[in-house]
Image: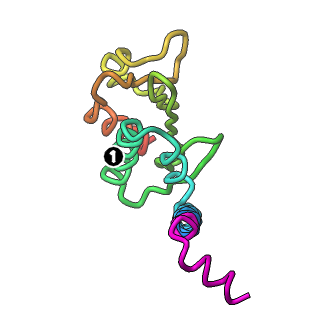
């Protein structure tokens, strides 16, 4: 038995395979632990490509910038933010980020209409190939929080 044990200890390819498996197991464990400590919105954002994650994180931070005490959660399988008596939602798709529901704000309807999804009354689409309309999003959050 000692002979076999010494053989494996001295076999470099065996040691490399063993450490490779060990490192993969540790990386997997670290990922699981990180995901357990993330909240639902962070988990939602983490599933996308880095460029999309960045846009979603900017959008998320706008809610906290405008309403520091806002509550975030996952509702209807997408991030939701308590804004006054209502919720605002966003969701990422292949070509855009959807932002919902945006209606009943006549004072900014002209600005909002540029982003209105076709054949909808309450959905905005922020295309990935265009900058996020930061100031407009802040206005929407502020106005919705006062309804």
The residue wearing badge 1 is 62
User: Residue 47 placed where, x, y %?
Assistant: 53, 44
Which residue lies most toward the front here? 3
Q: Nearer the viewer, residue 82 or 10?
A: 10
Left or right: 62 as drawn, with respect to 83: left
On-image quarter of the N terminus: bottom right
What secondary structure is marked by label 1?
helix
Left or right: 121 as drawn, with respect to 58: right
Vertical comparison of 3 with 139: above or below: below
What stretch of residues is rendered in magenta? 1-17
User: Residue 11 placed where, x, y %?
Assistant: 55, 72
Q: Is residue 83 magenta?
A: no
The residue located at (28%, 35%) in the rendering is 134
Image quarter of residue 26? bottom right
User: Residue 30 placed where, x, y %?
Assistant: 52, 67
Which residue lies most toward the top here? 119
The residue located at (68%, 89%) in the rendering is 2
The reply to whether residue 58 is visible in this rendering is yes
The reply to whether residue 141 is visible in this rendering is no
Left or right: 21 as drawn, with respect to 145: right
Which residue lies most toward the bottom here? 2
The residue located at (61%, 78%) in the rendering is 7
Q: Dominant secondary structure of the magenta stretch?
A: helix
Left or right: 109 as drawn, with respect to 27: left
Tell me the crowding category of disc 1: few under 14, some 14 to 19, or many 20 or more residues within 10 angstroms, Cα based. Answer: some
Vertical comparison of 20 with 11: above or below: above
């Amino acid at each position: 038995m000692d002979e076999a044990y010494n053989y494996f200890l001295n076999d470099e390819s065996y040691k490399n395979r063993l450490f490779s498996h060990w490192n993969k197991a540790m990386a997997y464990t670290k990922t699981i632990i990180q995901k357990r400590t993330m909240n639902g919105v962070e988990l939602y954002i983490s599933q996308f490509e880095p460029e999309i994650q960045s846009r979603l994180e900017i959008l998320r931070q706008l809610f906290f910038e405008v309403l520091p005490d806002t509550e975030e959660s996952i509702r209807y399988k997408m991030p939701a933010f308590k804004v006054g008596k209502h919720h605002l939602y966003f969701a990422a798709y292949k070509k855009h980020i959807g932002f919902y529901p945006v209606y009943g704000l006549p004072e900014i309807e002209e600005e909002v209409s540029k982003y209105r999804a076709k054949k909808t009354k309450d959905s905005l689409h922020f295309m990935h190939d265009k900058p996020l309309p930061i100031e407009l999003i802040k206005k929407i959050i502020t106005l919705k929080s006062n309804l």
